Amino acid sequence: MPKRVFISFRGEDEFKVNTLRGLAQFRNVSFTMDDVSLRKAIDSKDDTYIRGVIRPKIHDCDICLCMIGENTHRSRKWVPWEIGLAVDERKEIYAMRFWDASNATTPAVLTNNGVRPFNWDVDKLFEKIGR
């Protein structure tokens, strides 16, 4: 059974996450990526409702992947909450910077939980996920 990967990222990086999805499909990598914004937008501004949609996705995943762009460290709400929940759920957590963000600041929630991001390397990512 393929591993389920929840992707945490800032909304402005959605196109880049789509690129990662496409690469996984092109290379026939056996895992399922899941995130809320790319599958079905949550039509709500109610934080409780949004958390209720995201929480089971993180609970059901095997791995939480944080994709880091130039502004991910500025996320004060969703990225820290998603990663914090993954920590609480004892999920494996990986973090990878996008190809154009090799110098991007690491979000504090990752640093505080001992997660060290690596720069864009899909082969390395797919290898980690495939273990």
Image (cartoon, rainbow, N blue to C red):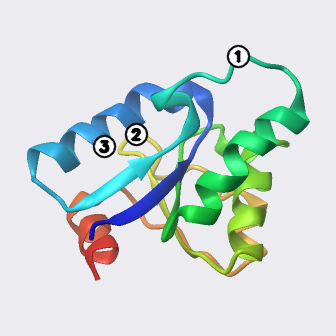
- Pick whichever of labels 3 and 1 is earlier in the sequence: 3
To which residue does mark 3 refer? 20
Q: CA distance from mark 2 to mark 3?
A: 13 Å
Nearer to us: label 3 or label 1: 1
Looking at this view, is 51 or 127 the one in front?
51
User: Where is 4 relative to 91, above or below?
Assistant: above
Q: Could you classify mark 2 by the number of other residues whose Cα lies within 10 Å: few (under 14), some (14-19), or many (20 or more)? A: few
Q: Amino acid at mark 1?
A: Asp
Q: Secondary structure at mark 1?
A: loop
Question: Which corner quadrant holds the N terminus?
Answer: bottom left
Q: In the rendered structure, which amino acid carries the disc numbered 2?
A: Asp
Q: Residue at x 83, y 42 (%)?
A: 77
- Asked if residue 28 lies left or right of residue 86, the reply is left
Q: Which residue is mark 1?
A: 43
Do the CB atoms of the residues marked 2 and 1 lie less than 8 Å apart? no
Instruction: State the residue at coordinates (26%, 75%).
Output: 130
**From this viewpoint, is residue 105 visible?**
no
Residue 83, x across and y down, in percent: 70, 61
- Residue 52 is marked as none
| In this picture, residue 30 sits left or right of residue 91 | left
Query: How packed is label 3: few (under 14 Cα within 10 Å), some, or many (20 or more)?
Result: some
Residue 97: image location, x then y, percent: 46, 53
| Residue indicated by mark 2 | 100
Judged by depth in the image, the label closer to the viewer, 2 or 3, is 3
First in residue order: circle 2 vs circle 1:
1
Answer whether labels 2 and 3 touch (C-beta < 8 Å): no
Instruction: Give the alpha-carbon distance from disc 2 to disc 1, as whole Å.
Output: 30 Å
